Structure formats: structure tokens, C-alpha cells
Amino acid sequence: MNAVIERTRPVSGGNAATATPAIYMKRLLEVAKDYGVDTNLVLRRIGLDPRALESDDTYYSLEQHIESIRAIQDQRNIEGLGLLVGRRISIADLGIIGYAMLSSLTFGKAIDVAIRFQRLTDPVLHIERQIEGDDIVLSIEPLVLLGAAYQYDVEETL
């Protein structure tokens, strides 16, 4: 089967439940640092203590997320930043959801688990899967206006 990714335009609105686990910020800053970005400046700009990134129960807001992307882009244009970060995220970073994916009998069932619980790991995007002949089509839609972070979030999800 071939995978086809569809991107759609951002929708307005969204809700307050857009807190994202800190592991994603940690992975973003690892990549940014590899490209020469001063990550301490990024953290100061978004008001996040570096020690918070080591905790499993730390989350950051949508506003901090968008501002972190801007802060990185202000220092350096990193082509394919979201793809680079997505490659660095391991299934273990997904916690219990990653374990459920690993425990799935097939790849398709693992994808179903990821989509079903996706809002727990990335609450700003909605993903749907459809099978069309020999193709699997993934539709990715933002749940909130992401501005500068839209391309990054879609890339990271891929």
C-alpha cells in the first residue's frame, strides 16, 4: 500500500485543551541546538524552565508552542524542521500510547491506535485515515490556528 498525505487549511477556533507533553519541546530544542540555535534564549522567550523538560508531567501551551517556532525561525531558518524533529521522536516518547502501538497485531492497527489517541500526544491536529484501493490516505487538519507552527506541526506528524 502507498501512503498519501493530504493537508487542509487551518480552521479557526480551537479549545483550551491544547497542552502538549514537554517531550515534544525537548526534541524540538535538541534539533534546533544541532543547527546552532541558542535554545536557552528560546526557553526564556516562551517562559519555560529547562528543568521542566525533564519531567513527564510537564506540558506547554499552544501559545508557547507557536512562539518557540517563531523564536527558532528568528535565529535560523531550518529547512524541514518538523520532519527533523519527527524523525527524532521515538515510539517510547509516546508513553502508554507508544506501548499500545507496539502491542498491536498489525501496522494498520498500530496506526489506528495512534489516530485514536492522537489528541493526547498532539492536541492541535486531527488525523483521519481512509483506504482508497491500494492507497492509505491520511488527512491532517489543524484544530486551531497555528500560524508559523502549521507547517512544522504537519511535518512533525508525518
Image: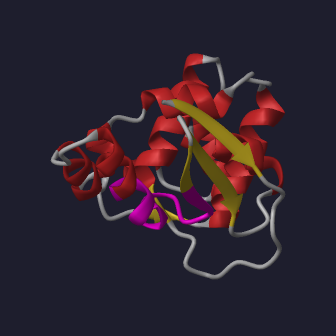
- Report if residue 58 is visible in the image: yes
Foreground residue among 119 and 132: 132
Seen as rendered, the residue at the extreme front is: 133
Where, by quadrant of the figure, is residue 89 drawn?
top left
Q: Residue at x 66, y 26 (%)?
A: 37
In the picture shown, does residue 141 fall above or below 84? below
Left or right of residue 85, residue 89 in this image = left
**Magenta segment range?**
113-128
Foreground residue among 144 and 134: 134
In the picture shown, does residue 114 fall above or below 33? below
Residue 118 inside the magenta-drawn segment: yes
Where, by quadrant of the figure, is residue 3 drawn?
top right
Residue 153 inside the magenta-drawn segment: no
Q: Residue at x 54, y 66 (%)?
A: 123
Q: Quadrant of the C terminus?
A: top right
Residue 99: percent from left, percent from top? 19, 49
Foreground residue among 49 and 66: 66
Residue 72: percent from left, percent from top? 72, 36
Q: Residue at x 32, y 64 (%)?
A: 57
Left or right of residue 137, residue 70 in this image = right
Residue 109: percent from left, percent from top? 30, 50
Q: Residue at x 40, y 65 (%)?
A: 116
Seen as rendered, the residue at the extreme top is: 35
In the picture shown, does residue 80 fall above or below 135? above
